Image (cartoon, grey):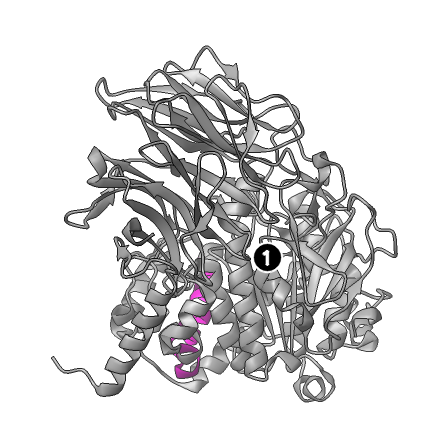
Amino acid sequence: MSCSKSALSRICGALAIFLAGWGGLGASEPTQLTHDGRLKREPRFIKQGSEVVYSVVESPIVMRLMRLDLATRAAEPLYPQAATSQFESAFSPDERYHVFVEFRAVTNVKMVIRDTRENRDVIFDPGSDRAHLGSPTVDPRGNRVVFSLPRTVGQQIVSVDLQAGNGKVLTARTDAVDDWPTFSPDGSQIAFASSRDGDFEIYVMQADGSNPRRLTESPGLDIRPAFSPDGRQLAFTSMRDGNYEIYVMNVDGSGVRRITNHPERDDYAQWHPDGRQLLTISERDGAFDLYLLDLAGQ
Amino acid sequence: MEIGSFAACHCGGVTRRAFLQAGALALGGLTVPRQALAGETAKAKSIVVVWLWGGSSQLDTFDPKPHAPAAYRGPFSTIATRTPGIRFCELLPKLAERSQLFSLVRTNRNLSADHLIAGSIGLSGAPAQPTQYPPNFGSIVARHRGDAALPPFISMSRGPVADGRAPMEGYGGGTWGKGFDPFLLSCSEDGDVEVPALRLLDGLSPARLFDRETLVAELDEKRRGLDSVAARRWTEAHARANALLTSAEARGALDLARESPEQRHRYGHTSFGQSCLLARRLVEAEVPYIQVNWSQYVELGPPPYGFGWDTHAHHFNMMTDRHLPIFDRAFSAFLDDLHERGLLSTTLVVCLGEFGRTPKINSLASRDHWPDCYCSLWSGGGIAPGRVIGESDARAEQPRTEPFFPASVGATMLELAGLNSAVRAEFRVLEGARVIHELL
C-alpha cells in the first residue's frame, strides 16, 4: 500500500490538530473507542470498567442502548429487540439492576428497573399523558433509584425503591430545574445540577436531600457531575469557556481545572473505575465518539 | 407499502432530457413561463426555509429574557452576539458569533396553536377554508419559476411533514393540486440521500434502478397490484423520482460524496447537518425553493416520531443534549458556506417554526405551544443583516411592537424571489400582505 507525501502530510496535520484539542493532557493521548460517529449519550462503565453501555442515535427516529467491549472494541445492541428509543442508563453496583428510560408514547417516557437476574421489569410510570423523568442513578448501597422528575413547579430530584415505590422528594420545591443526580461512591452524598440560582450550577447534598451546597459559580451552564471512584473529585461539563468542555474539581468546589480544550463538544464525562481515566463523548470533525482520557498527566 | 431506499450518491447517470421531464412533471404541466422575468427581478435566486417543525422556544434561542422570573426565563444563561445589545441563549455560541450575517424578527405571530393549522398557515400564509387549501410558499415560487431544470420545490424530510394525526395540509400545492407538491428527499447522518417516493419498491437498488428491463418489469408488476388511483399516483411519483435520479445533473447535486471530508464534518454528522449541506448543493444547482425540515413529525416519541421540536416534556434536556448544539453547528456552517461561496447574496435563508413555546414553564418543566410571539431568522438575498426587527415584552409573551403574521413572512419571501404584488395578485396569493420592509 502506498501513501502520497501530500496525503501523509494531511494525515499528520490532522493528527496534530486532533491531539492539540485535548489541552493540558501532556503526553497522554486520548483513546478513541468508537468510530461510527453517531450521536451518543450517557456512557456508563460496567464489568469493572471492561465494558461501556451508552445510547446511540441509530437513525433520526431511534435511540438504542449499546454495549461496547473495550478489549475488542466490538459494540452491539444491548437489547436488540427493543422497538422504541431507550436511553439514560444506570446500574446497581452488582449490576443486577439496570435502570433506563424509554419512550412509551409521544412525549411520554417510563423508567424501567430491570432485574437482570430474575429477568423481570419494574416500571416507574410518571403519568399516562405527557410525562417526563430523567437521569436515573442507583444508590451504591443498592436499594434506591434517584432521578429527576418534574413536579407542579420546576423539576426536582426524587428517589424510589427498586420496586418503584416508596417515593421521596430530595430537593425542595422551587422554580428551579434540578437534574443529573449522581451518588458519591459511599452513597452518602448526591451531586446534581440546578438552576435555583439562575443558570445551571453544580450542587452537592446529603443522600437524604439535606444540606445542599453550591460548588460552582460560572457564567455558563455546569451540568452532569460525576464523582471520582475515591470520592474526592467531581468531573462535569461546563460552557464557561464558550462551548461544552470537561472540567474536574475537588468535591468542595475548589481546584477547578479544565480537562478538554477543543472548539467542538466534549461532554458526558464518566470516571473509569481505576480513577486514572475519564470517558467522554466528544465531537471531533462533526462526529460523536467515545474517548478515554488518561489523567496521569494532570 | 414501503420500498427500500438507497444512497443516491451511488447512482449512475443519464440524460438531461429526463431531468427536464422531472421538472415538468413536478409542476403538473401548469408551469408559467416567467423564468426570465424572475431571474431579472429577483434578489433571491433561491430560497431556503429551515423549518423547525414542532416550534422552537423563543426564550431558549434568539429572544432570551434573563431578567424574567425563574418560571419563565428557564435554566440557561445568555451570551453576547456580534450585534450590539443583542444576546442569545448560551447554547447557540456559533450563531452568536455570526449574528452579523443575519437579521432577526422577534415579533412573529401565528393564528393557531395547533401544529397542523399553524404549520399550514406558517408555510402558506393563510388558513385553509372548507374547500380551499392555500399553496405552500414553495409551490408558489415553483409555479412562477416552473421551467427550471431541477424540480423547483424540494422539501427534505422522510415523508410529508406531519404530526401524529395527519400530514400538514400546507405541505404542498393545496388546492392547486399535487402537481405543485414538493419533491421529497431525505438525507441520513451519513449523507445518503433517499427519495421517499421510491420506497414503493422493496429492495430497489441503484443497479436495479438503472437496469431498464428489470425496472420496467418491476413497475408493471407493481402497477398490477394497485387500484387505478394509487397506480396513477405511484406512476407519477415514480416517474418524477426516476427522471431525477437518472439525470447526471441531479446525481451530481444529490451526491454528498463529492464534498470534501472537511465540508462534511463542518456541518456535523447528523441528519439535519447533512441536509443543510445538501441544501447548499441544491442552491448551487439553482433550485428555486428548498425546505429543510428538522424532522418529519413534530413529536418526541417512539418510532416513527423521533425528535421534533414539540417539547412539551424533556424540553431542557433535549435543548441541552441534542437540538441546540446540532442546530447551532449545522446552521452556522450553512450560513458560512453560502457566504464563502458568494451564494448568500442571492440566496434567501429563512429559519422558523410554526410557533414559539410558552414563556411560562409548564408542569413538566418544559414548554407548550405559543403562537402569540416567536422569532424568525433571515439572511442573504435582499436582507440587510445585523438587524433585530420587533420587540417582545419582558417575558416574550406578546409583541410590544407590530406583530408579523405568516402572510408577511410569505410576502417578504416572494417579493425577494421576484414575485411582486402584481404577480401575487395574479396568482391570488397573499394579496394585501405587508412585506417586512424593515428587513430589506
Location of residue A77 in the rendering, given as x and y in whole percent from the top left corner? 26, 42
Image point (27%, 56%), residue name: A32
Residue projecting furthest to the front: A255
**Type of residue at label 1?**
Leu
Q: Where is residue A206 in the image (x, y as percent from the top left)?
A: 48, 21
Viewer can see residue B164 = no
B96 in the magenta segment: no
Task: Residue at the far left: name it.
Answer: A1
User: In front here: B334 or B406?
Assistant: B334
Q: Which chain carries label 1?
A: B
Tag 1 residue:
B92
Specify start and end residues of the magenta stretch as a single range: B231-251
Q: In which quarter of the image is residue A112?
A: top left
B238 falls in the magenta region? yes
Question: In the image, is residue A17 above or below residue B158?
Answer: below
Q: Which residue is drawn at 53% across and 76% down?
A: B337
Residue A110 rendering spot, x and y as whole percentages: 45, 27
**Residue B134 appears left or right of B435:** left
Q: Nearer the viewer, residue B241 or A151?
A: A151
